[in-house]
Image: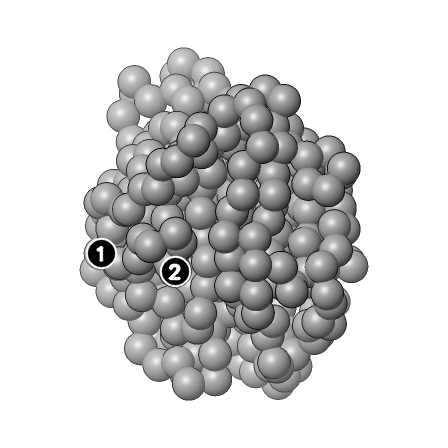
């Protein structure tokens, strides 16, 4: 694969809509809303996959992703429905349910496996997996895994939001991020709603249910709406009940290089990460007890 360098291009307020790319992840179809050719990052957010809603047929395994490596990023797992089991090379084994947050900081290197169907009774699959690029100060550091069983919610006038990371309307998330970030799961009743945001943050919306409108632009599932920066609030209209992820942060100052599961700065660093995983030289540790096989690096 050809890695692409990305440098943030700060903008003022805008509404730029990109279609997600449909990709297959271990047999399941997902909508990759970020990165897109015209929009590589939103703050330090550098990857957004939306999977489902779908049903796993009876007797079939769920979306099992075998052991694979990461570096230079944090993975953020958030479910709307269903359950999943996380196992990683720090020894953490953690089931995750809707409303709970798994935040895995890869640092210099970690590997993990993600298992969809936790029991035979689990049929529904719906969620997002997002990545956050780590800053220079922590991207070479040790790996860490945090599970947050409950998060603050903000409710006002038909808007109901769960705060994954950052601060919103007086609430503060317990999730520890290495750079300023905002991550919200927003449910709206029909009407017009204002979301207060820091003026220096660029933000984006990924709709997961229903549809919303921002400044006359209709946004539906399968799209990323990049909103730029320079607003102190975003006004969102919903004609029907809707749900979306709202992400943001200050634009990244440094260019990223993303290749497979790695976020680095140079081609040499990327080559070294691929070589370490292929050689199994200990950089990414070992995942024990995974249901699916270790995933080979693509060439
Ligand atoms: Mn992963």
Query: On residue 92, which mark appears?
Result: 1
> Which of 22 and 119 lies nearest the eye of the viewer?
22
Label 1 neighbour load within 10 Å: few <14, some 14-19, many 20+: some
Q: Please name which of the two marks, 1 or 2, marks the residue nearer to the observer.
A: 2
Q: Report which residue position mark 2 lands on.
A: 166
- In this orientation, does residue 88 appear? no
Q: Is residue 24 above or below residue 298?
A: above
Is label 1's Cβ within 8 Å of ligand 1? Answer: no
User: Is 47 on the left or on the right of 185, as rendered?
Assistant: right
Q: Observer-nearest residue: 44 or 212?
A: 212
Observer able to see residue 235: yes
What residue is rendered at 75% in x and 55% in y?
A: 14
Residue at 45% from the left image edge and 53% from the top image edge: 183
Q: Residue 42 in the image: state x and y as whole percent.
A: 61, 61
- Asked if labels 2 and 1 touch by Cβ distance under 8 angstroms, the answer is no
Position of 52 relative to 293 (above/below): above
Residue 68 sits in quarter: bottom left
Residue at the image position 55 percent from the left and 23 percent from the top: 190
Q: Secondary structure at mark 1?
A: loop
Locate the N terminus and report the quarter of the image it occupies. Answer: bottom right
Q: Position of residue 265 (x, y in %)?
A: 60, 81
Mark 1 / mark 2, whichever is N-terminal: 1
Closer-to-camera residue (146/2): 146
Residue pictured at 51% horizontal, 63% vertical: 198
Task: Locate the C terminus and report the quarter of the image it occupies.
Answer: bottom right
**Real-space CA distance between mark 1 and mark 2, rounded to the nearest whole angstrom:** 24 Å
Viewer-closest of 229 and 2: 229
Provide the secondary structure element on which disc 2 rests: loop
């Amino acid at each position: 694969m050809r890695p692409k360098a990305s440098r943030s291009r700060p903008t003022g307020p805008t509404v730029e809509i990109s279609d997600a790319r449909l990709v297959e992840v271990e047999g399941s179809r997902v909508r990759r809303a970020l990165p897109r050719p015209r929009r590589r990052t939103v703050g330090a957010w550098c990857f957004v996959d939306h999977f489902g809603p779908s049903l796993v047929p009876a007797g079939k395994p769920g979306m099992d992703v075998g052991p694979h490596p990461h570096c230079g990023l944090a993975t953020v797992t958030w479910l709307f429905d269903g359950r999943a089991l996380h196992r990683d090379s720090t020894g953490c084994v953690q089931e995750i349910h809707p409303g709970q947050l798994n935040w895995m900081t890869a640092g210099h290197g970690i590997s993990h496996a993600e298992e969809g169907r936790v029991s035979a009774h689990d049929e529904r699959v719906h969620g997002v997996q997002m990545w956050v690029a780590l800053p220079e100060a922590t991207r070479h550091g040790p790996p860490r895994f945090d599970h947050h069983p409950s998060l603050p919610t903000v409710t006002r006038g038909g808007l109901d939001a769960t705060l994954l990371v950052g601060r919103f309307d007086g609430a503060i998330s317990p999730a520890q991020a290495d750079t300023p970030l905002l991550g919200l799961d927003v449910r709206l009743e029909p009407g017009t709603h204002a979301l207060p945001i820091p003026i220096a943050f660029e933000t984006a919306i990924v709709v997961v249910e229903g549809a919303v409108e921002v400044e006359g632009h209709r946004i539906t599932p399968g799209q990323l709406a990049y909103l730029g920066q320079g607003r102190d609030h975003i006004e969102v209209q919903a004609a029907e009940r809707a749900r979306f992820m709202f992400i943001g942060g200050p634009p990244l100052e440094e260019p990223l290089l993303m290749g497979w599961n790695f976020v680095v700065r140079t081609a040499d660093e990327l080559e070294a990460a691929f070589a370490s995983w292929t050689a199994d030289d200990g950089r990414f540790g070992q995942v024990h007890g995974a249901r699916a096989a270790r995933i080979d690096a693509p060439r």
